[in-house]
Amino acid sequence: MGFLGRILAPVEFAERCAGAVRYAKTLADHFGYELALLHVVPPPPLGMAEEVYARSAAEVKEKLDAFLAAELSGSSVRRIVVKGDPARKIVQYALNERSDVILMATHGLGGFRRHLLGSNTAKVLHDADCPVWTGVHLEATGASPFPIRRILCAVDLGPQSANALAWASTLQKEFDARLTLAHAALTMPQWARRAAPYHEDAPESSWSVTLRSAVQNELEQLRSDSEAAAEILVEAGEPAQVISETAQRLNADVLVIGRSSAAGARGRLRANAYAIIRQSPCPVVSV
């Protein structure tokens, strides 16, 4: 298997999910690999008879077999139904089957973190080992990932930054796209409120120049180590807003971010991952 050899698309039968599956199909067809459609039947409500639950699960299997059957004909598609907690089963399946990416819509069922992305998507983003490709544009009927001409890779310069850039670089080479490596740096007033008191009197202009130079050097080192052909961009401001505005300005087709960096000053992008995904004008791959 090669890059994106196994694509996993969880199915909830909603129209937003149909759009995401269409998007996943286009990717799978491009790479010539398998698309797995997974539906998870939640545990039965208290009081439901076992035979009723079993019959319901069988009906769901028939529904999954018929889901976008005509549109997916001719593609390599596997359809699987399992029972249990949806997010946990999605993560477990991806791990067991060595999925290269989980592609899913941003809004799911359930109350946990509903105000952010939908419960299942938020939990999968938190727990999955493989990249998760998601975003509001996956939900549009007929949405397509092609052409991919512009890729934005946003990093917080934490441990996961190298993996995010390597993934973005591979995607760039696959589609001969243009790649920009970006970092959102805190402005002086924001930073001063969070730092030690002795920094508060430093001139903002001097501090900004020093910070930009330091960040530029780190980004150049990261680019060199990854051997990535990427432009470098440093912007000041809160990560979610800066990255979303940058993606909009660059007309990015895909945004790649890291989501497993350590907490703290170098974990700001991770802490803002949900907000970035929600605000991004294009689909987001969280590596």
Image: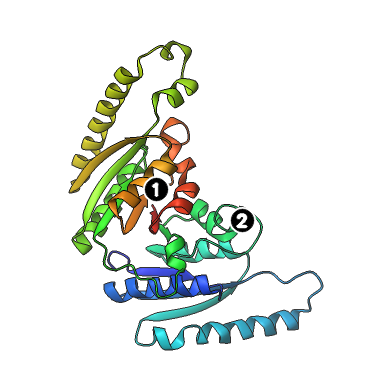
Q: Amino acid at mark 1?
A: Ser
Picture quarter containing residue 109? Answer: bottom right
The secondary element bearing badge 1 is classed as helix
The N terminus - image quarter = bottom left
In the rendered image, the vertical position of residue 30 relative to residue 254, given as above or below: below
Can the viewer see residue 163? Answer: no
Q: Nearer the viewer, residue 160 or 229?
A: 229
Which residue is identified by label 1?
244
Counting other residues with Cα less than 10 Å from the Cα at mark 2, is it few (<14), some (14-19), or many (20 or more)?
Answer: some
Query: Which sits earlier in the primary sequence, circle 2 or circle 1?
Result: 2
Cα distance between the residues tagged 2 and 1: 21 Å
Q: Position of residue 59 (x, y in %)?
A: 63, 85
Q: Nearer the viewer, residue 107 or 261?
A: 107
Question: Residue at left 65%, top 69%?
Answer: 42
The secondary element bearing badge 2 is classed as loop
Can the viewer see residue 121? Answer: yes
Side (left or right) of 30 relative to 9: left
Question: Residue at left 64%, top 54%?
Answer: 112
Which residue is identified by label 2?
114
Q: Nearer the viewer, residue 141 or 25?
A: 141
Q: Position of residue 67 (x, y in %)?
A: 50, 83
Q: Position of residue 214 (x, y in %)?
A: 27, 27
Q: Does the CB distance between marks 2 and 1 fall below 8 Å?
A: no
Side (left or right) of 206 relative to 103: left
Question: Residue at left 30%, top 42%?
Answer: 182
